[in-house]
Each structure stands twice: as C-alpha cells, then as structure tokens.
Image: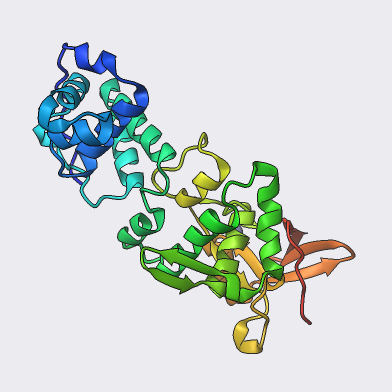
Amino acid sequence: MKAFPPLQQSSRKREFSLYTDAERSSVVYHWLFTSNGFRELDTLCLNLDGAHSHGWQSMGIAHYLGLNEAHHNFFDQCPMSYALSLLLAQSDQDPAYALIYCYLRDWHQSHPQEEEVSVLLAKEHDPDYQTQQVEASYWVLHTLVNSSDEQQIDDQLRALATLDPKKHAVKLGKHHYHVSDAALKEAVKCLYDFQCQICQTRVYRPGWLATLPRSAQWHFLNADAHHILPLYQEGPDSLDNLLCLCPTCHRKFHTEQLHLIRHNQNLGCEDVILGRQWQVTEKHPIILHP
Ligand SMILES: [Zn+2]
Ligand SMILES: [Zn+2]
C-alpha cells in the first residue's frame, strides 16, 4: 500500500473546538473511507443541514487535523486493520498521524456493526481467511458472546458444545448462513484467545493492540483448529475433539511428530522424534479416542 499523504494542518481551530471527539472521529472516518463531500459530512457526522452549512464545519475539523483532498477516500475498500497499522507506522515520523490514528480507532471501536468485520476480513484476500470461517467468527462474536461480560465469555463459548447445531445460523445482509462446524472451530480458537495449546505461540495480524477488549482482539489474531481424531476416521465434529493450535504444531500433529497423552487428570503432549513430554493448556473438556 502507498504511504498516507503528508498532513497539512491549518491553525484555524474554531470549528474543531465546537465539536466533540465522537463527532470529530466520525468526520475523520467518513473523509478517509467514503467518497462523501464535506456537505454530506456536515449532515452525516454533525447533525447539520449540509445544504445550509455548506460543509464548512466538517471541512474546518478536517483541515485543522491536516486532512485535505489528497486523503479523501484514501482508504476506500481497505480493511480497518490495515488503515490503523499504516497510520501507526507513520506516527513515528510525525505525531500528527497518531492523532488521526486515535480518531479512527475510536470511531472503529464505537461502531463495530457498521464496519461489518466479516466483510472487511473477507476483503483481505488472506488465504487463511475462508469466507465460511469469517462468517462463523462474526456469528461467534455478535450472537454467541454478544455483550456478555468478560467473565461469562468462556462459559458461552464452552456452551456451544451443547447447543443445537441448527441454531448456529448467522445473518449477514440479506443472507442466512449455517455455520455449525465452522462455529465450533472459531469457538475453540476464541476460548484460547488464539494461543496454541501446545507451545503458547500466537500469530498476530496488523491492527492488534493489547489495549483492545478481549473479543475485539480476536479480529487481529490467527490460529488453526485441529480435530484430534480426524473426521475421516469418524472422529466427532464436537468441541471435545478440537484443539486450538499454531500452524507449526498443527503440521507436527499431521506428520505424527506430536501425540496427545493423558496422565491421570492431566493432558499432555509427546514429541515422539525429540522424545519430550509436557503439559497442555486445557480450558475445555478434551476426549482422547483410543
Ligand atoms: Zn504451537
Ligand atoms: Zn488438523
């Protein structure tokens, strides 16, 4: 992606001072992500009649922050995660970029639905991000753990194991999708916050921030779900037959370098080539089929 154009701040603070941070972030978002002009922005973001206010209010805010025509619709069709990481990278050179970053991040955090995370992620054309998987993660986030408080999230995810698979449906736009198996895979990843149960590795995606709420961080992490007893060996498609793994450990299970073992109550892993054993993170009931 090309660099974000230089900011040319104006010293005129009058319009900027009149509005709240939420209104300013809305102006920043719409100027960078849509083709709406300042008249429309006055209406959309500031609750004014743009035809009468002539767009001068939102223009004043944008110009004070250094945004001009060069930035208009710059992030058209671009995933929010890329926009945020680009601005963050450039804020090393000039802290003014960090301010744009903050307004954009605030807007993003207060408008999760309008961003249709699933659609954004699908647009990344990431080979690891299959549409079905993205839909399932949308469903897990917006239906299953939707507005649960932090302590209940794990219980909600584990409860999916006993939920009727017919209810694993997600609506995106006009379409309904059934996500039963994909939802289980997403749930096991979310339960472990995308951290490998075997080696604790996490794979981060651009836009990840430690300060985001737990479930918001899930958009910016990557992991594999693995069936302990493979489906082709008639292993069940159930949560107790799934593990959350990093790509490296996942490969090692499929090359039979790694095996799960159970000692009394503890679940362990054995590396049969290097001859090592260690304990595995276990946040959900796991059944080993002999
Ligand atoms: Zn691993
Ligand atoms: Zn696998």
Q: Taking the image as drawn, is residue 253 in sight?
A: no
Q: Is residue 88 left or right of residue 35?
A: right
Q: Is residue 45 left or right of residue 262?
A: left
Residue furthest right in the image: 264
For the C terminus, which image quadrant?
bottom right
Task: Judge whether 195 appears above or below 227 on screen.
Answer: above
**Numbered-mark total:** 0
The image position of residue 130, as x and y in percent, is 41, 68
User: Going 68% across and 81% down the picture, which residue do you hit?
Assistant: 236
Q: Taking the image as drawn, is residue 40 in sight?
A: yes
Q: How is the image coloured?
A: rainbow
Q: Quadrant of residue 254?
A: bottom right
The image position of residue 172, as x and y in percent, is 40, 63
In terms of depth relative to the viewer, which is nearer, 49 or 210? Answer: 49
Task: Judge whether 231 appears above or below 1 on screen.
Answer: below
User: Going 45% across and 42% down the picture, which residue do you hit?
Assistant: 208
In terms of depth relative to the viewer, which is nearer, 284 or 109? Answer: 109
User: Going 34% across and 55% down the picture, which residue do you hit?
Assistant: 120
The image position of residue 197, as x and y in percent, is 66, 58
The image position of residue 260, as x and y in percent, is 73, 70
Q: Quadrant of residue 276?
A: bottom right
In terms of depth relative to the viewer, which is nearer, 257 or 67? Answer: 67
Task: Judge whether 5 appears above or below 176 on screen.
Answer: above
Task: Judge whether 267 appears above or below 20 on screen.
Answer: below
User: Going 26% across and 28% down the picture, which residue do you hit?
Assistant: 46
